[in-house]
Amino acid sequence: MAGLVTDIDGGMLEGGGQILRMALAFSVLKKKPVRVFNIRAGRSNPGLRAQHLKGVEVVRDISEGKLKGGEIGSTEIVLHPGKVKCGEYSADTGTAGSICLLIQVALPCILFSSGVTILKLRGGTNAEMAPQIDYMTEVFRPLLERFGGTFDYKIITRGYYPRGGGEVHIRVKPVKQLKAIDLVESGDVVRIWGWAFVAGSLPIKLAHLMADSAIQTLRKALKNVDVKIERYVEHPDVAVGTGSGIKNQYRLPPGWLCSRQARTEA
């Protein structure tokens, strides 16, 4: 764990949590200590929030590292990473904090561990200012597979703002290295599909309204493209709280997958 500490200004560019997550992941992968200061300086409530702290802690645990400054509100942390250790890890934001952002910071590390790793994560599956869990499973995962990595997943429950309570399990088999791919030419959209959903006390007519409005707009803009959007109600056993959303995926000829999503809550 010895070595010079690399300083990262967390207030650069938009000054959000992404700088922190990337700094932590690179620190573990490069086995170099890192100090991140001015954490989330560009936000109205700077410093570590619950979801950021849990991300820091799970990376510390995965790398058997030493952490300084790991507490709610901290604007500076120092991580001295050790060796990435496979196994089973859990993290619970205790809020509707994004599960997907926990995956973002942990996945790069465990992709290069010594064995299979399981993450059991709790928080928001469909959270504000973060990728939705559907994006991670339906767009990010297929793209990662083109690089040679992947993960298995199980969505135990979905959790919405403000209650959270969602739970997702991720199983990752490590790789020796990732491979380069060619994604230079995007081509034109050839198909659009997706789904609109409601959960809790919201009526199915809201899902129909979202889907119908999206189809009308998309068909007007892309006249010769097939557009299909399913509509459904989340079963109470697999959804905590009240929420709704719509997700559309776009397929382009070279195998690209793109996504647009929107989320609301009550």
Image (spheres, rainbow, N blue to C red):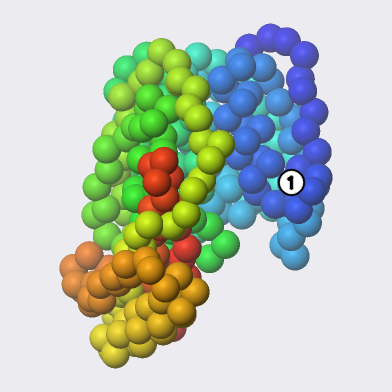
Judge whether 208 appears above or below 121 on screen: below
Judge whether 90 appears above or below 101 on screen: above
Which structural element holds mark 1?
loop
Residue 126 occupies quadrant: bottom left
Furthest residue to the front? 224
Q: Residue at x 49, y 22 (%)?
A: 180
Looking at the image, can residue 263 be seen? no
Q: Residue at x 58, y 48 (%)?
A: 52
Quarter that holds the C terminus: bottom left
Q: Residue at x 27, y 38 (%)?
A: 152
Judge whether 194 appears above or below 173 on screen: below
Horizontal and vertical percent position of residue 188: 47, 54
Residue 245 occupies quadrant: bottom left
Furthest residue to the top? 2
Please state if 95 lies on the left or on the right of 45 as rendered: left
Residue count near mark 1 (Cα–Cα under 10 Å), binned few <14, some 14–19, many ≥20: many
Please state if 62 lies on the left or on the right of 31 as rendered: left
Horizontal and vertical percent position of residue 145: 36, 32
Horizontal and vertical percent position of residue 238: 22, 65
Please state if 4 lies on the left or on the right of 116 as rendered: right
Name which residue type carries label 1.
Ile
How many circles with numbers are drawn on the protein?
1
Judge whether 145 appears above or below 266 on screen: above
Residue 8 occupies quadrant: top right
Looking at the image, can residue 170 be seen? yes
Quarter that holds the N terminus: top right
Horizontal and vertical percent position of residue 208: 30, 85
**Residue that numbered label 1 is attached to:** 39
Q: Residue at x 32, y 54 (%)?
A: 167
Along the viewing direction, whichever of 47 and 18 lies nearer the viewer: 18
